[in-house]
């Protein structure tokens, strides 16, 4: 007889929701976590063994498909997913797509062939648009990026609000010519573009958006062109951490300083953003929470396949540094 989350909850004397939170490595009181982990060991619970999907011989494996493992955002996300999978006695197969739809197709096919228990996936915009036409025999939870409404569970940042926050912050500091450099492959960048554009319009400013492959190499080239113009902006916003890195590299090449020559802000509170120059203002994303929430949704989907799709939207936090201070 298979053991489910409810059995573990009864053995631990807690609610099924608490068991799910422990499995997904969410914050739980230490004494509750100890009781749940003890109950997991005593009952022999494994999420995949208790799910109806696994009765068709699915493996004890989670697939994790990300666009660029070099991006610290996805490195941290991968660690959060692996930690939760380890606690549940499950393995993780990590695939890197390089934002290439053909590679995505190949890895999705691999997940089918390997009969994985479920997949956590950050799709390109091109593949995301086709997800409602693809049928998988495993549950899929989308992270960082969304797909067609009402099809898959997803965990995303409130990207529109986060981008609007950066614009509002720069406007409040006296900047009026605010340009944006956005990735050209994901729904995340598209949502951040929407937030940027709406906030610029609300402030009575003219949006100036540029698009680039979301990696430092492409961003250096694009930023070098923007920063070399006679009409270069007063402030520049990057839509992800790798693009922000490329802009910082281009500024170093051109011997430009922030904020004396141009204000700079972006996404992802990586260690280097607090060290370079006078520190760069960023939106800090709750990356570990995104990974933990994705695993929680996946475990719950495995347990109850028929439930309606859910969207978890988390908020970012503005980390203000000297790169957006108005020069005297």
Image (cartoon, rainbow, N blue to C red):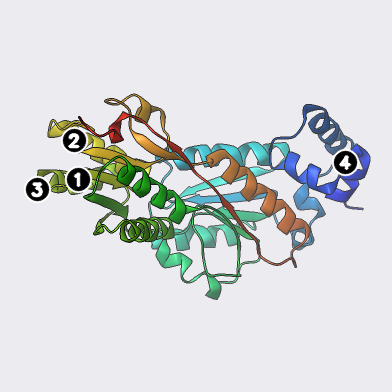
In this view of the protein, can residue 290 be seen by the observer?
Answer: yes
- The CA distance from mark 3 to mark 4 is 62 Å
- The CA distance from mark 1 to mark 4 is 53 Å
Dot placed on the residue nearer the N-terminal end, 3 or 2:
3
Dot placed on the residue nearer the N-terminal end, 1 or 3:
1
State the residue position of label 2.
251
- Judged by depth in the image, the label closer to the viewer, 1 or 3, is 3
- The CA distance from mark 4 to mark 2 is 54 Å
Element assignment for label 4: loop
Residue, x 72% and y 51% (percent of image)? 299
Dot placed on the residue nearer the N-terminal end, 1 or 2:
1
Q: Position of residue 52 (x, y in %)?
A: 79, 61
Q: Position of residue 178 (x, y in %)?
A: 25, 49
Q: Is residue 166 above or below residue 76?
A: below
State the residue position of label 1.
223
Element assignment for label 2: helix
Q: Position of residue 95 (x, y in %)?
A: 49, 49
Label drawn at residue 146: none
Dot placed on the residue nearer the N-terminal end, 1 or 4:
4
**Do labels 1 and 3 touch, CB within 8 Å?**
no
**Do labels 1 and 2 touch, CB within 8 Å?**
yes
- Judged by depth in the image, the label closer to the viewer, 3 or 4, is 3
Residue, x 82% and y 28% (percent of image)? 31
Residues packed near mark 2 inside 10 Å, few (<14), some (14 to 19) or many (20 plus): many
Left or right: 194 as drawn, with respect to 212:
right
Dot placed on the residue nearer the N-terminal end, 3 or 4:
4
- The CA distance from mark 1 to mark 3 is 10 Å
State the residue position of label 4.
14
Element assignment for label 1: helix
């Amino acid at each position: 007889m298979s053991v489910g989350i409810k059995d573990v909850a009864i053995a631990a004397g807690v609610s099924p929701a608490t068991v799910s939170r422990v499995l997904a490595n969410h914050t739980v009181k230490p004494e509750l976590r100890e009781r749940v982990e003890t109950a997991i060991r005593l009952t022999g619970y494994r999420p995949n063994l208790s799910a109806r999907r696994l009765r068709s011989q699915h493996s004890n494996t989670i697939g994790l498909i990300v666009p660029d493992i070099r991006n610290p955002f996805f490195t941290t996300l991968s660690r959060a997913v692996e930690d939760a999978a380890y606690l549940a006695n499950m393995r993780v197969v990590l695939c890197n797509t390089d934002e290439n739809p053909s590679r995505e197709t190949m890895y999705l096919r691999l997940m089918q062939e390997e009969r994985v228990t479920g997949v956590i996936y950050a799709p390109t915009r091109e593949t995301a648009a086709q997800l409602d036409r693809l049928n998988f025999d495993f549950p899929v939870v989308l992270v960082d990026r969304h797909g067609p409404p009402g099809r898959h569970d997803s965990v995303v940042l409130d990207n529109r609000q986060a981008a609007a926050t950066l614009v509002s912050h720069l406007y409040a500091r006296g900047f009026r010519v605010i340009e944006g450099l956005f990735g050209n492959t994901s729904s995340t960048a598209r949502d951040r573009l929407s937030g940027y554009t709406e906030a610029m319009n609300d402030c009575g400013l003219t949006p100036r958006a540029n698009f680039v492959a979301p990696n430092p190499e492409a961003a250096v080239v694009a930023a070098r062109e923007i920063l070399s113009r006679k009409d270069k902006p007063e402030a520049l916003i990057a839509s992800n951490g790798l693009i922000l890195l490329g802009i910082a590299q281009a500024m170093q090449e051109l011997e430009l300083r922030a904020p004396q020559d141009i204000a700079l802000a972006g996404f992802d509170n990586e260690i280097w953003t607090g060290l370079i120059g006078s520190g760069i203002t960023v939106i800090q994303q709750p990356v570990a929470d995104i990974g933990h929430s994705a695993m929680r949704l996946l475990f719950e989907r495995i347990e109850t396949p028929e439930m309606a799709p859910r969207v978890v939207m988390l908020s970012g936090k503005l980390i203000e540094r000297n790169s957006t201070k108005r020069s005297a």
